[in-house]
Image (cartoon, rainbow, N blue to C red):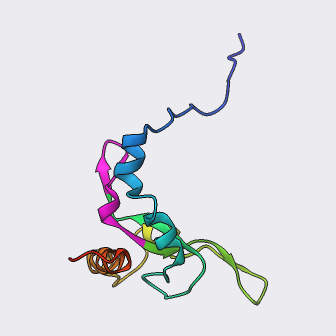
Amino acid sequence: MRIKRSGPPKRKARTASERQRIYGPKSYVPFVKSSPCAHCSVEGYSETAHNGNGGMGRKKDWTETMPLCGPRKLTSGNWYEGCHAKFDRHELVGFDAEKAVTATQQSFHEYQGEPE
């Protein structure tokens, strides 16, 4: 008997409130993408990196995120996987994620013109 496989399990689409909890205000993701990487300071490749998880496969709230660079091609022609992938694998030795999250939130509030 042959088992029919339909591919990987499909995830439910996120609700608007879940997207808001994970990614914050609409202006936050563009802010993070325009910010330098919190680890290596490279500009133009930042992604929203969540510091830890919310348990049971959930991402933490947007207030626990920071910009970390994603994959990019180096001038040598080789690819660099980026700090985000290394952070997810706990390979950024000596990197203070809590400090990076705090600095990101402070910068975002200043960017929005909001008091701390």
Residue positioned 31% across, 55% down in the render: 61
Measured from the top left, where is residue 25 in percent x and y?
39, 58
Measured from the top left, where is residue 46 in percent x and y?
53, 74
Q: Quadrant of residue 77?
A: bottom right
User: In screen coordinates, is 52 left or right of 16?
Assistant: left
Residue positioned 27% across, 76% down in the render: 102
Nearer to us in this view, 40 or 86: 40
Quadrant of the drawing holding the N terminus: top right
Which residue in the rendered view is the most extreme toward the top?
A: 1
Nearer to us in this view, 106 or 65: 106
Q: Is residue 29 above or below residue 83?
A: above
Q: Quadrant of residue 44?
A: bottom right
Check residue 112 for magenta coloring: no
Which residue in the rendered view is the most extreme toward the front?
A: 113
Q: Quadrant of residue 81?
A: bottom right
Nearer to us in this view, 107 or 99: 107
Residue positioned 67% across, 76% down in the render: 72
Check residue 65 for magenta coloring: yes
Residue positioned 35% across, 59% down in the render: 62
Nearer to us in this view, 67 or 81: 67
Q: Is residue 1 above or below residue 10?
A: above
Quadrant of the drawing holding the C terminus: bottom left
Measured from the top left, where is residue 4 in percent x and y?
70, 18
How many labels were placed on the picture? 0
Measured from the top left, where is residue 82 in percent x and y?
57, 75
Which residue in the rendered view is the most extreme toward the left?
A: 116
Span highlighted in magenta in the image: 53-66
